[in-house]
Structures are given as structure tokens and as C-alpha cells.
């Protein structure tokens, strides 16, 4: 009976020891196992059983990528400006054994290494270059930290400069510089806008003057062509009249009669000079008629009043208030041409 109880107790103890030494490693984790104080193996995700009292789990390590936000570090630039720089380091463990036995405190070592590396990089750069070269700083820090942490089983995947805080006096100077730069850009933009407006206005005036000159030129050409056409038509009509007279075969008596009628028009009481034909024989036969026509021998004084100019007949197509501006303009141009023709005829009559 006592032996049975002892056996049962041993079985229970064995079961307790077995179940208490079963380990389930979660995904993205690793267990470092020591055998009698010496590194034995690394358990990956899954079910594992360790030997009681001989093996132990030395360290549980997460294989996920970790984000380490280190506090701001004071750094000095090449031009002796002290500023605070806050950086963020992204890392993950690629070798649990090296991470466990490579360094006493890997996170603290990485933080100190990040601070010294940042000071070395910023120390070779000036203030303006530091503010505009974040990508360069990130790349240099990642390369340096990754190489330095390989013996620790750490892989530095990325480094980011989260914030750069210069001194207050530097911030005030930068604010004034930024304000001056914006005012300069505003002045330049206003000057460019004014220049474009002046150029556009000048180009508009130029085009307007060119169009006005072309319109005046076309108007003058049209008036000249109309005047030339009207004069040509008058001379063509006169030539056609002479040609018709030649074709009819006018007798000498008719021509003489036309000459007397012309003399009558000349001697209308206003002429001061009279041109007589040189044919004395014919003149003697028509002297009486000429004397009657010219009024020679009477006391009739010469009429020196200005002869009324004939008025152009009114165009029946022109209706005030109904006709268009183009029609009125054409009628005015026609009237001006007729006035010029009458003036030319008057000058020829005076001569």
C-alpha cells in the first residue's frame, strides 16, 4: 500500500515537472536557452520542452522591428552654434545570441552610439547646411550605426531626425531673414506684374495705332480710287460725246452756232477778259451777233457778284433716321467728289 502511494506521488511530481517545463514560443519571438549556465540553443516559434533543473530560458527576445525615440541631444555645429536634435532609430534583432551576449545593455549602448555619431556628423556641418540636409544626416547615421551594432545582433533599418531646435536668438534671426525674403519676393512679383501690365498696355496702344493707321490708309485709298474713277468716267463721257459728234458729222454752221453759245456763256456779265477767234473773215460776218451777245456799246456794268454754285441733287435713297451709317458715309463721299469736280471746272472757267 505504501509503495503504491509513493508511486502515485512520483507520477504526479513527474507530470507536474513535465507540464511546467513545456514552453510555447509566440510568433516573432525567440528564447535563448542555457544548459547549466552555458548557451545551448535558441528556440523559435512553436512548442518546446526544456529539461528541468538543467536548462533554463536565459532571455526572451522580440524579433519585431522596434522604434527607439531617444531624448534630444545637444550638438555643436561647425560654426559654433549649439542646438538640440531629437532623433528616432528603427532597429530589429537578427541574432538573439549576439543580442544576449554581445553587450550588456544593447538599447543603452545604441542610444549612446547614436548621440556620439550625431555629434560627429553635425560637427562637420554649418547651421544652414544642418537645417537643409536631413536626408544626408539620416543616411550617414544609419550606415554608421548599422556597422557598429552588427556584433550586437542588431540591424538598424532606418534613422530619422525628428526635430532640430536652434537657440532662440538664432530663431529670431531666421524669422527676420524669412520675413525679408518674403518681402523681397513680394516686391519682385509686384515689379514683374507692373512690367507686364505696362508692356501689355504699350502693345495694345501700338496695335490700336497700327489698326487706326491701316484704316486711314484704306479710307484714303478708297477715296482716291473713287475720285479717280469718277474723273475717268467724266473724261470718258466727254470723249464719247466728241466721238459721237464726229460720227454724226456736224456742219460748220452748227459748230459756229455752238461757238456763239459758248461766247454767250463766257460773256454773262461777270467776265473781264474775252477771247475772240483769230479768224478775222468769219469774225466780220458774225460781229453784229457778237456785239449783241457781249453787250458792247451799251452802258450795262459788269456783274462782279459770285456766281452761285450749282447744288448737287438730293439722293432719293437717303432717308434720315432710316439709312445706315455706311449708306450715309458713301453719300457724303460721293458729294465730296462732286464738289471737287465742280471746283476743278470752276478753276478751268476762270482761266
Image (cartoon, helix red, strand yellow):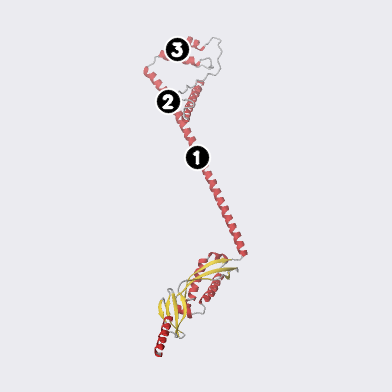
Q: Secondary structure at mark 3?
A: helix
* Quadrant of res 22: bottom left
Q: Cβ–Cβ below 8 Å for labels 2 and 1?
A: no
Query: Residue at 55% of width from left, 65% of height from top?
Result: 131
Q: Which sits earlier in the primary sequence, circle 3 or circle 2?
A: 2
Observer able to see residue 278: no
Q: Which disc, if any, is residue 282?
A: 3
Q: Residues within 10 Å of mark 2 (few under 14, many from 20)?
A: few
Q: Which sits earlier in the primary sequence, circle 2 or circle 1?
A: 1
Q: Residue 54 location in percent, x, y?
A: 44, 85
Q: Residues within 10 Å of mark 3 (few under 14, many from 20)?
A: few
Foreground residue among 263 and 96: 96
Q: Which sits earlier in the primary sequence, circle 1 or circle 3?
A: 1
User: Residue under circle 2?
Assistant: 233
Observer able to see residue 255: yes
Q: Residues within 10 Å of mark 1 (few under 14, many from 20)?
A: few
Foreground residue among 83 and 272: 83
User: Residue under circle 1?
Assistant: 210
Q: Secondary structure at mark 1?
A: helix
Amino acid at each position: 500500500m505504501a509503495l503504491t502511494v509513493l508511486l502515485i506521488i512520483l507520477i504526479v511530481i513527474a507530470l507536474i515537472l513535465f507540464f511546467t517545463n513545456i514552453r510555447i514560443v509566440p510568433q516573432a519571438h525567440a528564447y535563448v536557452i542555457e544548459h547549466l549556465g552555458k548557451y545551448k540553443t535558441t528556440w523559435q516559434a512553436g512548442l518546446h520542452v526544456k529539461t528541468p533543473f538543467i536548462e533554463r530560458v536565459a532571455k526572451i527576445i522580440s524579433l519585431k522591428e522596434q522604434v527607439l525615440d531617444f531624448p534630444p541631444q545637444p550638438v555643436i555645429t561647425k560654426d559654433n552654434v549649439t542646438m538640440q536634435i531629437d532623433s528616432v532609430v528603427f532597429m530589429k534583432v537578427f541574432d538573439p545570441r549576439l543580442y544576449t551576449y554581445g553587450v550588456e545593455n544593447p538599447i543603452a549602448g545604441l542610444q549612446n552610439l547614436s548621440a556620439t555619431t550625431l555629434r560627429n556628423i553635425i560637427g562637420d556641418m554649418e547651421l544652414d547646411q544642418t537645417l537643409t540636409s536631413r536626408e544626408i544626416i539620416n543616411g550617414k547615421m544609419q550606415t554608421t550605426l548599422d556597422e557598429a551594432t552588427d556584433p550586437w545582433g542588431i540591424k538598424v533599418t532606418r534613422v530619422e531626425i525628428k526635430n532640430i531646435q536652434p537657440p532662440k536668438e538664432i530663431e529670431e534671426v531666421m524669422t527676420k531673414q524669412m520675413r525679408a525674403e518674403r518681402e523681397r519676393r513680394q516686391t519682385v512679383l509686384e515689379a514683374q506684374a507692373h512690367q507686364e501690365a505696362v508692356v501689355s498696355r504699350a502693345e495694345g496702344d501700338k496695335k490700336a495705332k497700327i489698326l487706326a493707321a491701316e484704316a486711314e490708309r484704306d479710307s484714303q485709298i478708297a477715296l482716291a480710287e473713287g475720285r479717280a474713277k469718277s474723273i475717268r468716267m467724266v473724261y470718258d463721257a466727254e470723249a464719247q460725246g466728241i466721238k459721237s459728234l464726229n460720227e454724226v458729222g456736224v456742219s460748220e454752221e452748227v459748230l459756229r452756232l455752238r461757238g456763239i453759245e459758248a461766247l454767250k456763256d463766257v460773256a454773262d456779265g461777270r467776265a473781264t477778259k474775252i477771247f475772240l477767234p483769230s479768224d478775222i473773215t468769219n469774225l466780220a460776218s458774225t460781229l453784229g451777233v457778237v456785239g449783241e451777245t457781249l453787250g458792247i456799246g451799251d452802258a450795262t456794268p459788269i456783274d462782279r457778284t459770285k456766281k452761285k454754285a450749282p447744288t448737287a441733287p438730293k439722293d432719293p435713297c437717303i432717308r434720315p433716321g432710316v439709312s445706315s451709317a455706311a449708306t450715309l458715309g458713301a453719300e457724303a463721299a460721293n458729294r465730296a467728289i462732286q464738289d471737287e469736280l465742280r471746283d476743278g471746272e470752276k478753276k478751268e472757267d476762270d482761266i
